[in-house]
Amino acid sequence: MSDLQRDFVIKTVENRDVHFVRFWFTDVLGTMKSFAVISSELEDAFDRGMGFDGSCIEGFGRAGETDMLAFPSPTTFQILPWRPDSNAVGRMFCNICTPAGEPFEGDPRYVLKRICRKAADMGYVANVGPELEYFYFKSPDAAEPLDRGGLFDLTSLDSATDLRRDTIITLEKMGIPVEYSHHERGFSQHEIDLRFTDALSMADAVMTYKQVVKEIALKHGVYASFMPKPMADQPGSSMHMHQSLFDLNGNNAFFDESDPSGNNLSSVAKSYTAGVLKYAPEFCMVTNQNINSYKRLLANGEDPITLTWSKYNPTSLVRVPGYRPDSEMDSRIELRNPDPAANPYLAFSVTIAAGLKGIEEGLELQDPIEKGQKLPADRRELAKMGIGTLPATLGEAIDLFEASELMKEVLGEHIHSYLIEHKRAEWEEYQGRISQWEMDRYLAVL
């Protein structure tokens, strides 16, 4: 943290009549946490951090780890546009530390910072550009959509155009550039895509995005949900994750116009992609962390479950976008299984780490699934063809995650063990519940 960055925040707080600054951070599961600091405490917070009780934060507290310090990052300072101009409210993301001033190993932001440093040590900047989908509902009590529009509809069916507009304006006021927005396939389902940037900045932006979407929805008297599959008869919501590596001179390390395959992918890009495909079953519990996530990842040909890559096939886990095939800046891969309920700090960490591992191991990329090549929807038939798939349930994902040495290395013992314990308890609780589907199907006939 430079004195210039710190001084800029303090002067902005004074000049813009900012009375409170919210310190933002996430728990291990990706839920936003916050406490407010009055402006007169900012200088002390920059120097010494602000103490809080970590025992009440999911995945933070355990024996001897209740007292923690939040150090605000001045580069993340923004004024919240939905709060009044008078006695305004700002926000900064925080780095969580122990009382000794050491980074706390249970802080998801710290995990991503470690992975970004690893990429830098290898000579790269890891960039991410997510496409987050979500639903608008009339209330949080039921999945009752606002409209029955479809993909790219521009009609009266798309009743949420004003909500998207207000959301984008708010994001841009907070310094988060948006590429475009549109109505998605499902009833009242929407997508706003953020312009790619480095992974840490993007994870902060994703958390801000989710907060802004919900705040603007509330302002309009409706509810926004990032639940992966809220309606059985409608498509699920994804967080397609565009990724690339740039070298430290600003050149795209994924681009090679002499690529013999014609995809303009460098050897770095191919090994990175091979790593993502190899380790996807192991990181799936992080990118798809809820029981509901696997209601979206079905073997029905509509969502990505196969450990393959392609330019066109929708069931492939990785797609190589072909909008501008000869553009160096646009050369990237698109990872298609993550959903918007994931913790972006951890999701970016594990997927980037898988790609970097592929480079370290010198993995070779398999042949793509070509245009028009149809794969069977049945997982057993795919296995007979030698094509791997993502885990079918959270229970399967937990087992693969638990056995993964890479996940232990990337996340650290604290987060890795916590996620196993927490998610296994969630899975076992779910397994013990009796659904209405079971009652309707079995009660009267068995």
Image: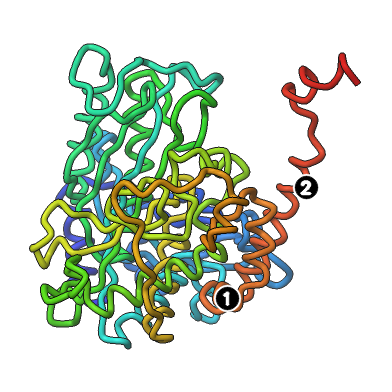
The residue drawn where x is 37% and y is 16% is: 146
Residue nearest the observer in this picture, 125 or 331: 331
The picture places residue 29, in percent across and down from the top left corner, at 55, 54
Residue nearest the observer in this picture, 72 or 32: 32
Label 1 packing within 10 angstroms: few (<14), some (14-19), many (20+): some
Label 2 packing within 10 angstroms: few (<14), some (14-19), many (20+): few
Can residue 285 be seen in this snapshot?
A: no
- The C terminus is located in which quarter? top right
Number of numbered discs on residues = 2
The single residue placed furthest to the right in the displayed view is 446
Colour convention: rainbow
The picture places residue 160, in percent across and down from the top left corner, at 28, 21
Q: Which residue in the protein does label 1 denote? A: 412
Number of the front mark, 1 or 2: 2
**N-terminal of the two: label 1 or label 2?**
1
The picture places residue 382, in percent across and down from the top left corner, at 55, 54
Q: What separation in Å lies between label 1 and label 2 (alpha carbons)?
A: 24 Å
Residue nearest the observer in this picture, 310 or 225: 310
Q: What kind of residue is marked 1?
A: Gly
The picture places residue 420, in percent across and down from the top left corner, at 68, 62
* Badge number at residue 428: 2
Q: Secondary structure at mark 2?
A: helix
- The N terminus is located in which quarter? bottom left
**Whether residue 82 is situated above or below residue 92 in the rendered picture:** above
The residue drawn where x is 34% and y is 62% is: 368
Residue 185 relative to residue 225: left or right: left
Picture quadrant where residue 367 is located:
bottom left
The residue drawn where x is 41% and y is 78% is: 358
Can residue 421 be seen in this snapshot?
A: yes
Q: What kind of residue is marked 2?
A: Glu
Residue nearest the observer in this picture, 152 or 223: 152
The residue drawn where x is 32% and y is 67% is: 43
